[in-house]
Amino acid sequence: GVRRGRALGVAAATEERVEEFDFAEVRRDFPILGEVVNGEPLVYLDSAATSQKPAAVLSALDLYYRASNANVHRGAHALSARATEAYERTRDLLKTFVNAERREEIIYTRGASEAINLVAATWGEANIEAGDVIILSVLEHHSNLVPWQLLAKKKGAELAFVGLTEDEQYDVAQLEALLAEHSGRVKLVGLAHVSNTLGCEAPVKEAAALAHAAGAKVLVDGCQSVPHQPVDVQDMDCDFLVASGHKMLGPTGIGFLYGKYEVLEEMPPYQGGGEMIDEVFLDHSTFAPPPARFEAGTPAIAPVVGLGTAIEYLQRIGMDRVQAHERELAEYLESELAKIKGIRIYGPRGADRATALVAFNIEGAHASDLAFFLDQEGVACRAGHHCTQPLHRLFDAKGSLRASMYIYNTKEEVDALIAALKSSLEMLGVEA
């Protein structure tokens, strides 16, 4: 497996990528995978909702509170310096992880949802006006819909939506058409890099080029891409990218916003308080430059430290290897599910599926019933709309069952899912 010596790693150099890696061994690093559920060994297939955490991350959290707990940036004493170093080190790791140009382009947030809300409340407030157009898509997570709905309603702006191609992928040709239709009025294009329901990858680099040519900014939801494949914000040329720490082996309650520095520099503060100020007078204040301007108050220090350890863990494996492992799992998962009678798999098939995530329905069986029976056999899948109600409405489906995999999953677990599905369908009186 992938292990680190000192969990907090305050003074340690970033560890090198391991030369050879066995994904079968990685499971040993995840204590929770040894759990027994309803008398059966746990088969965890819900990583798109949240990933499990390796022992190194758990140790980093524990060690931070045992040996380094102090507030950051505000103290001259040794513990504060130690905590600050660990806290800021994660920013350097994130800069490298997504290939930002500057460390100051990384802003810590509670998660991707807060990161999008931050952009809407700062850049959006300052730049969106009545009659402006925000282009989103029908496959977006609610977190990349609702903040823009609220802003559009407040400002008198319009929303337009990119649809799907015949094989259920992001329709970049329709984006081009919408940009032409609303020429001169489009201020923002927001899109998911990888869909959390369809598993398809949007052509973000092409979309960004089209948007910029039309004078619009681009926000990319990287929640299902950053944990699973190499991501390069400079190459895709997005203005903003958001991601959640808990989906990439890190703790809950921590995520980040990447923004081009020249864009961040022009944005007003998100919240007022300590840390985000330059000088405070009784009747007015001046504000710190990014990223501090957007990080008011005492931050989530321990989760930030844990996220840093999670990034090191992934870097040691190599994101190209993570992607290759998941593509292999995706192909096997989809091909085995496709053998089930009456199944409807959502999203593109074969090589166009960007991640080991498949949402589906089976004729004659309700997704929630299947999830319940699967759980009785130790298999954890997610049933529901996966925070994509408009997309499910498009498919005339109230919800779907989703199996999603990560670095710690195996083909044997796909076999366990299929066996549990067949026995569940039998119990429901549905032919498999």
Image (tube, rainbow, N blue to C red):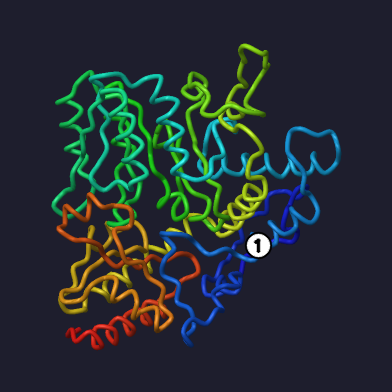
Residue drawn 56% across and 30% down? 294
Residue 203 on image: x %, y %: 30, 43
Residue 111 shown left or right of residue 366 in the figure = right
Quadrant occupied by the N terminus: bottom right
Q: Nearer the viewer, residue 209 or 179?
A: 179
Residue type highlighted by circle 1: Leu
Asked if 383 appears above or below 119 in the picture, the reply is below
Could you tell me residue 29's position as x and y percent?
A: 61, 70
Residue at image coords 43%, 81%: 378
Residue designated by label 1 = 58
Image label count: 1
Structural crowding at the residue carrying mark 1, measured as other residues with C-alpha within 10 Å and reported as few (<14), some (14–19) or many (≥20): some
Q: Identify the residue shown where x is 60% and y is 73%.
A: 31
Residue 341: where, in percent of width, then height? Answer: 17, 79
Give the answer, above or below, for where 35 lies relative to 9: below
Classify the position of the C terminus by image quarter.
bottom left
| x, y percent for residue 373 | 33, 81
Q: Residue furthest right?
A: 77
Residue at 29 percent of width and 87 percent of height:
423
Q: Which residue extends farthest front?
A: 282
**SS at mark 1?**
helix
Q: Quick check: 55 left or right of 325? A: right
Q: Nearer the viewer, residue 49 or 317?
A: 49
Q: Is residue 277 above or below residue 364?
A: above
Viewer-closest of 282 and 36:
282
Seen from the viewer's position, the closer of residues 218 and 421 is 421
